[in-house]
């Protein structure tokens, strides 16, 4: 395994509260995973664009676009399943932080895609963290619910 990913603390800052297991099982899944999560994507980025960029790290088995659970339209994230661990590691190492559709994307190891995980978990239907943003960018339709959340 590449040295960068020997240190569990460095592997991912994200903890999925809906993971059906212990912290140890979660960490083990991250260390073996061939699935990556991509965040901070434009709502207009297509699966074809994702395929073109991420296949530079290796052959892709499957892409699942993240969707707003109400509108069923892309809401800024996706999951990519590779065939090999090395390719998933290269994707995190080399593609995270690069610009896709004018946005710096974040590539994170994921514990593994399961049906249902493609939907935004926010109350609005999109991603939770977008609801906490206080800024709103009309060009990319992200954020803007922060003030509402603060009032509650
Ligand atoms: N591997 O970084 C990630 C990641 N994220 C951010 C989402 N997913 C990720 N997977 C990996 N790495 O399948 C996955 C989720 C799910 C799908 C959509 O994407 O596993 P979501 O983004 O809508 O919901 O998920 P998620 O992940 O549950 O939300 P988030 O942002 O981590 O929030 C978790 C908790 O923190 C919530 O209780 C929320 O109330 C709170 N929170 C989040 N942002 C803030 C904030 N700015 N201030 C205060 N509280 C906050």
Image (tube, helix red, strand yellow):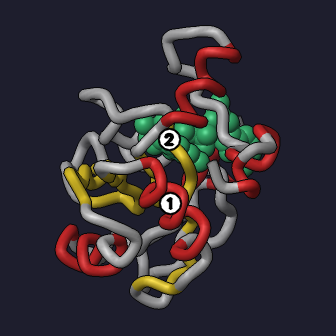
- Vertical relation: 50 (above or below) 130: below
Q: Is residue 123 visible?
A: no
Residue 59 lies in quadrant: bottom left
Residue at 65% across, 27% down: 27
Residue 36 visible to an observer of this rendering: yes
Q: Quadrant of residue 6?
A: top right
Q: Please, is residue 75 above or below residue 142 in the view?
A: above
Question: In the image, ligand 1 is in what quadrant?
Answer: top right
Q: Mark 1, residues whose alpha carbon is within 10 Å: few (<14), some, or many (≥20)?
A: many
- State whether label 1 is within 8 Å of ligand 1: yes
Name the outermost residue toward the bottom.
102
**In what element is the residue under mark 1?**
strand
Residue linked to disc 1: 39
Q: Secondary structure at mark 2?
A: strand
Label 2 CB less than 8 angstroms from ligand 1: yes
Left or right relative to 119: residue 13: right
Residue displayed at 41% across by 57% down: 77
The disc, 1 or 2, on the residue closer to the chain's N-terminal end is: 1
Whole-Å distance between the Cαs marked 1 and 2?
A: 11 Å
Q: In percent of the image, x 27 and y 54: which residue is there?
A: 65
Towards the viewer: 138 or 12: 12
């Amino acid at each position: 395994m590449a040295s960068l990913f020997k240190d569990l603390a460095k592997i991912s800052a994200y903890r999925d509260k809906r993971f059906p297991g212990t912290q140890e099982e979660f960490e083990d899944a991250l260390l073996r995973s061939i699935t990556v999560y991509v965040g901070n994507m434009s709502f207009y980025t297509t699966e074809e664009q994702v395929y073109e960029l991420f296949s530079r790290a290796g052959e892709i088995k499957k892409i699942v676009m993240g969707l707003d659970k109400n509108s069923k339209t892309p809401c800024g994230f996706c999951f990519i399943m590779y065939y090999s661990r090395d390719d998933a590691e290269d994707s995190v190492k080399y593609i995270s932080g690069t610009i896709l559709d004018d946005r710096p994307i974040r590539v994170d190891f994921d514990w593994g895609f399961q049906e249902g995980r493609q939907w935004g978990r926010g109350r609005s239907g999109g991603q939770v963290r977008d609801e906490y943003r206080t800024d709103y960018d009309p060009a990319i339709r992200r954020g803007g619910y922060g003030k509402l959340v603060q009032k509650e």
